[in-house]
Amino acid sequence: MNATFQLVVIGAGPGGYAAAFLAADLGMDVAIVEKEANPGGVCLYRGCIPSKALLHVAKIISEAKHAKAFGIEYNEPKIDINKLRDWKKGVVSKLTGGLGQLARARKIKYFQGEAGFINSSLLKIKKADGSFEEIGFKNAILATGSRPSVIPNLPKSPDIWDSTSALDLESIPENLLVVGGGYIGMELGTAYHELGAKVSVVEMTPGLLPGADRDLSDVLFRRAKGMFAKIMLETKVLKMEAVAGGITVTFTDKEGQEFKETYNKVLVSIGRRPNSENLGLENTRVKVNARGFVEINDQRQTADPNIFAIGDVAGDPMLAHKASHEARVAVETIAGHKVAFEPQAIPAVVFTDPEIAWCGLTEIDAAKAGREVVVSKFPWAASGRALTLDRTDGLTKLIIDPKTQRVLGVGIVGVGAGDMIAEGVLAVEMGAVASDLKLSIHSHPTLSETIMEAAESFFGHSTHIYKPRK
Amino acid sequence: MTELKLPELGENIVQGTVTKILVKVGDVLKMGQNILELETDKAVLEVPSNADGVIAEILIKSGTIVKVGQPIFKIKGESTSTQTPGRQPGDMASAVSPSRLPTSEGLQPKAPQGNQPTPSDPHNDTTNLTTPLPIRKDIPAAPSVRLLARELGIDIALVPGSGPGGRISTDDVKAYCKMLNTSRPGGSAPAAASHPLPNFSKWGSVRREAMNNVRKKTAEHLSFAWNSIPHVTQFDKADITELEKLRQSVSNSGKKISITPFIIKAAAAALKKFPQFNASIDMATQEIIYKDYVNIGVAVDTDRGLIVPVLKNVDKMSVLQISDELAALAERARLRKTTIEEMQGGCFTISNLGGIGGTCFTPIVNWPEVAILGVSRGSMEPVYANGQFVPKLMLTLSLSYDHRIIDGADGARFNRWLCEAIQQPSLLDLGQ
């Protein structure tokens, strides 16, 4: 007789392990099936955490360079890539090891291997040692995540990277081309630039970071222009050829002009696709849409009532914090609570330099929906704190409903925007009105004051901006 | 041996009273076969089996109140599905129903029902959950407030917010919940509680009888309508001399056409002419919902009480089609065969008491509709025309409406227009 679990979680990324841990805390009998020896998923092993470790290093290098402007000069940094890689690995293993301990402490049965559905209550696990085991379940949560999208028909070459290989930190190339100006490309491009690579970016659309409001991405663009060797917008990659010492890339620009360039490495970061194949979903009633996402309802329940799906495999936005929140909804639904996935604001953060963060309604969304909004901005040139950091390249804006004065969205670009956006999320979720932000005292001198001043500006009397009366 | 549970029967039906058990122990059961007659809030439904097998034990009897998901039979043999068909994949779409107005059933705060997992068994089969409320985007309420509303079974979109920018607080949700409770007589209605009944038996013998479901529902629904709608009733008279001639000419021994289909047809035209009469009010959003379809409910007197089946898209039907459909609906109502669907979706109601008598009356608007037409008995009256009194068959039409969106002048115009339409029956689409 096979063991039967009240809940089996397939995939232990930030969605899966959060689900398993909560379920165990609620008293359920839980199993995890995961390829890696410890929980963590892409986020910890090959995504958020290692990239942020590298971006921290990049920031130190960049700030050391910047210090010259204040009369502090350092020598060129010497980079020991092996030591750097070991440090990054150490961060990852410390975190994932810690999660493994937390799973054991909760008495969660951990199967290292790959799962396939036999039917809607039975799972076959191909374990890491090659053996097979079948387990039964009352409920299952699919949290299998996503993987980098690939460009078809590329030559097989170790010089073509995806985000995973870029984070392996095998070498620092002299020339690096980043294909795709989305957040992954921009973050890794920034890190490699600071580590000494000459980085070029090619993007099909007219702007970097499609999806972000243009006034925010423009601030990044202005700085990136000075950082990156070349930013090619509205340009397509036609062909890549492996040559000695790198990859020759053929481009075509918006006029249709073709040109070639050779790079030591090419990082392909054109998006991610859900891992919904090879799971035996055809043996269940689970439905998968044309883009490969598992179809779910407000409770994250699939068309097969005992199977739930969360995180990247269940749809956009593919963000770790969305997955963890969905984990809570799915598990509480299984536990019989009346819950739904109904956030008003899912923050998006791009950890470039400067950072870009937004939540709730964007100006792009408002324009698409034909919704009337008032945008109240506070440029960081008027922030004392930004001046002390010598980083006035920033902007804080509130997207406000003119009738109710409710804060519908917040957008920030500037150093530390990723941490600052939390206040915006709280404001949107709480249904705060502009005067709530204006009347809450923000500590001085901090960048958070820019949120308060953007709210003051909505009423036409920001302390640090003078607007003549009409 | 497996248990057969009462399946889900329709939106908002959580329980019913067993009126008849159509099978007995030892019967071979086929999926889809009718097993019970169940009286719900408004209709008697035939309940089909959702499994195959042989009935081993019947766990209920006539008169028992059973809840959706409650075991009703024990069955032997193969059972293809004995689960309550809870949320089905197809329900995903309906979970985001765009309607912001609740049905009258939806107004009742959903108290924890028997088909919820019990606390002692928190990891019950998820298929036993009640249909969750749809998610609402762009609602000015904190996550904790939204969760509270969800737990109470209240659609947060209906709760009026008292805070800046319409923000909904915990207190707003509680107040809304309380309002729903007190607007339901029989619930925790303070009106009933604060006025104790005298001891009637002091003056002679009395007997107490439980209200049937139709009576309970009628009492609740009409109290709610009366309490929430500021009513005005206007009377007008239509000369139906010509209409009566026409009616008699199309009726024959085999088929008697009443006056009601003509009035329905004229009312359908009036609803198109006066769209504010084909509307509903959403006070939560301060919006008026105008309907592009014309469905008219007709009050039918049955031995159990008042039933209002709805004729759908009457504007697209001829008088004779309406007559046939109406006869069929009334017959179904008297045979207790009316389905919940047949009683939903009305835009306007007509109550014809002319068969009984009376000169005029003040009908109560059938919320969430905004107007109702009462039809009395026609009578011969002297009408002064061209310098002399002539005998005319006159019919009083009593129009009650929701004064919040319909002004008195519009009420008078609507009723006059209707009278004039009826006076010229040749303009109505008879369908001959």
Image (cartoon, rainbow, N blue to C red):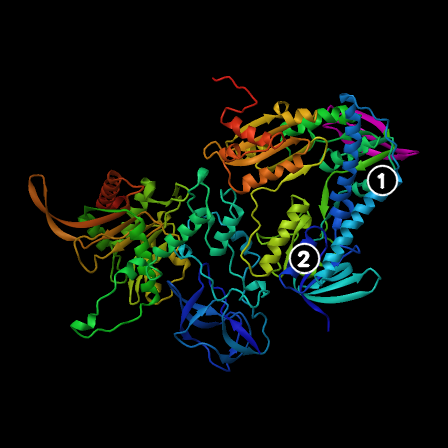
Kindly identify which residue carries mark 1. Answer: A84
Q: Pick whichever of labels 1 and 2 is earlier in the sequence.
A: 2
Which dot marks residue A21?
2
- Location of the N terminus of chain A by quadrant is bottom right
Q: Is residue B293 above or below residue A361?
A: below
* Quadrant of residue B215 within the rendered picture: bottom left
What chain is tagged by disc 1?
A
Residue B250 in which image quadrant: bottom left
Residue A432's place in the image compared with A6, above or below, is: above
User: Could you tell me which secondary element the residue under label 2 belongs to?
Assistant: helix
| Residue numbers of the magenta segment | A232-261
Q: Is residue A111 visible?
A: yes
Pointer 2 chain: A
* Residue under the point 28% across and 60% down: B194
Of residues B299 and B417, the one nearer the viewer is B299
Percent across and percent down for residue A356 are 67, 33
**How many other residues sit within 10 Å of disc 2, few (<14), some (14-19) or many (≥20)?**
many
A39 relative to B273, above or below: below
Which is nearer the eye, B264 or B429?
Answer: B264
Q: Nearer the viewer, residue B258 or A455?
A: A455
Q: CA distance from mark 1 to mark 2?
A: 32 Å
